Amino acid sequence: MTDFRNPTGIFVFLDEHPDSINDDWMVFCSAANPAERSAWSDLPASYHNGAGGFSFADGHSEIKKWASASTKRGVKQTSSDFPVSVGNDASDIASNGAAGFGGGQVAETRLGFHMDSAN
């Protein structure tokens, strides 16, 4: 774990939405720019009652309850409409410093905005 500066904040595995599984990585931005927050290129899963699971480099895991309707998309069995616009509610993808999903540094991100014991 000494290879990671923040092993509690780096997710290693996550549930990905079935419609966006097209490769072996998770890309949250659509323009190869980590600061871009208008669409999901790959969508995290929400099939656990509107939530998705994440495991982190230190070995712990978390369930993130999503807030935005665009993140809680139903399974359509097609990826033809990706990237998915975040619409008017960017709370699930918006940067929140080091605690944001994107946060600007993919290797140092922590899943979920407003992540606390209540989520």
Image: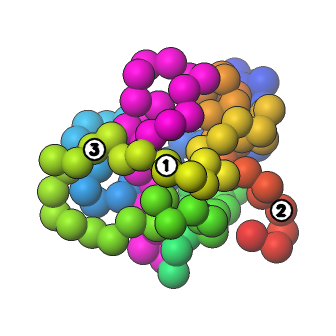
Q: CA distance from mark 3 to mark 1?
A: 11 Å
Q: Is residue 47 above or below residue 7?
A: below
Q: Quadrant of residue 73?
A: bottom left
The label nearer to you, 2 versus 1, is: 1
Badge 3 element? loop
- Residue 89 vs 22, above or below: the answer is below
Q: Secondary structure at mark 1?
A: loop
Q: Secondary structure at mark 2?
A: loop
- Of residues 34 and 108, the one nearer the viewer is 34
Judge left or right: residue 68 versus residue 99.
Answer: left
The numbered disc on residue 4 is none
Residue 82's mark?
A: 3
Image point 60% across, 23% down: which residue? 35
Which kind of residue does numbered mark 1 sit on? Val
Q: Residue at x 82, y 73 (%)?
A: 118
Q: Which residue is mark 2?
A: 116
Residue named by callout 1:
86
What amino acid is found at the position of numbered circle 2 in the picture? Asp
What quarter of the picture does the C terminus occupy?
bottom right
Lower position in the chain sequence, tag 2 or tag 1: 1
- Quick one: 60 or 70, which is closer to the camera? 70
In the rendered image, which quarter is residue 115 located in? bottom right
Residue at 63% x, 65% y: name it: 67
